[in-house]
Amino acid sequence: MLIFQTLLLYLTTMVSMFSQDKTATRQAIVTAMHKGDQYIGLLKPWKIPPNTQTLIDKEKEYFTVATWGTMHPARAFKFARLTSAIGEQLHSEGSGLIGETRQVSTWGFSDFRAETFTVWHEREHMAAFYRSGAHRRAMTEMKEDVSFRVRRVWVKGSDLPTPGDSTSTKAFVSRIKNGDFPEAVKKA
């Protein structure tokens, strides 16, 4: 009986180690994909909520979040369904959002990517939104389907793209992806 228990413990440990190694390898691959992703393609022009443009201080640094997620393309429809409600909530009056853009891309048969770039009046506005209804629901339901990475940076009001302008939006996103803005360290 002791030999059986020892063998069972050994096998359980080996399976757990293999699973952890596989997960760690997957995470390392996703991190490398994120760091190397400079693609700018199906990017929507910069969009702002009503009455935002008059509130921008050109010299102030605003909290900016770039989210990047990869998933199997079979999950794209679920992702689209869940995130459609987020846009309405994001652009509602008083959300603290200054502006946003997003893009999706397909990389072969096994990699669908979605990115968002949001700028906030205050870091706390972003935190409140991320914990809110539609966003929280989507994150909970997609937890097992999407591998996410996040960049947090500080952007001056003078660096923001012109609403509706694709060229300035692409230049702005390129600067975020290239690391041109100071990093905003995650609060503990």
Image: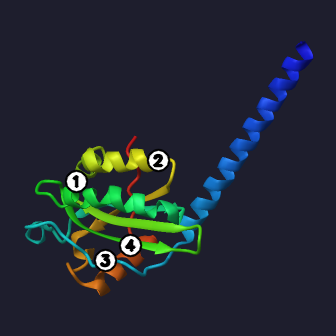
- Pointer 1 with pointer 4, Cβ within 8 A: no
The front one of 84 and 59 is 84
The residue beneath circle 3 is 44
As drawn, 49 above or below 27: below
Label 4, label 2: how far apart the Cα atoms are: 20 Å
The residue beneath circle 2 is 143
As drawn, 45 above or below 93: below
Element class at badge 2: loop
- Pointer 4 with pointer 3, Cβ within 8 A: yes
Q: Position of residue 141 (x, y in %)?
A: 41, 47
Kind of residue sitting beneath label 4: Gln
Between discs 3 and 2, the one toward the N terminus: 3
The residue beneath circle 4 is 103
Numbered tag placed on residue 122 in the rendering: 1
Location of the C terminus (image quadrant): top left
Kind of residue sitting beneath label 1: Glu
- Pointer 4 with pointer 2, Cβ within 8 A: no
Numbered tag placed on residue 29 in the rendering: none
Label 1, label 4: how far apart the Cα atoms are: 24 Å
Between discs 4 and 2, the one toward the N terminus: 4
Between discs 2 and 1, the one toward the N terminus: 1
Q: Residues within 10 Å of mark 4 (few under 14, many from 20)?
A: some
Location of the N terminus (image quadrant): top right
- Which residue corresponds to the image point at 36% horizontal and 82% vertical from the top-left? 171
Label 1, label 3: how far apart the Cα atoms are: 23 Å
| Residue projecting furthest to the bottom | 167
- Comparing marks 1 and 4, which lies closer to the viewer? 4
Left or right of 48? Residue 18 is right
Kind of residue sitting beneath label 2: Lys
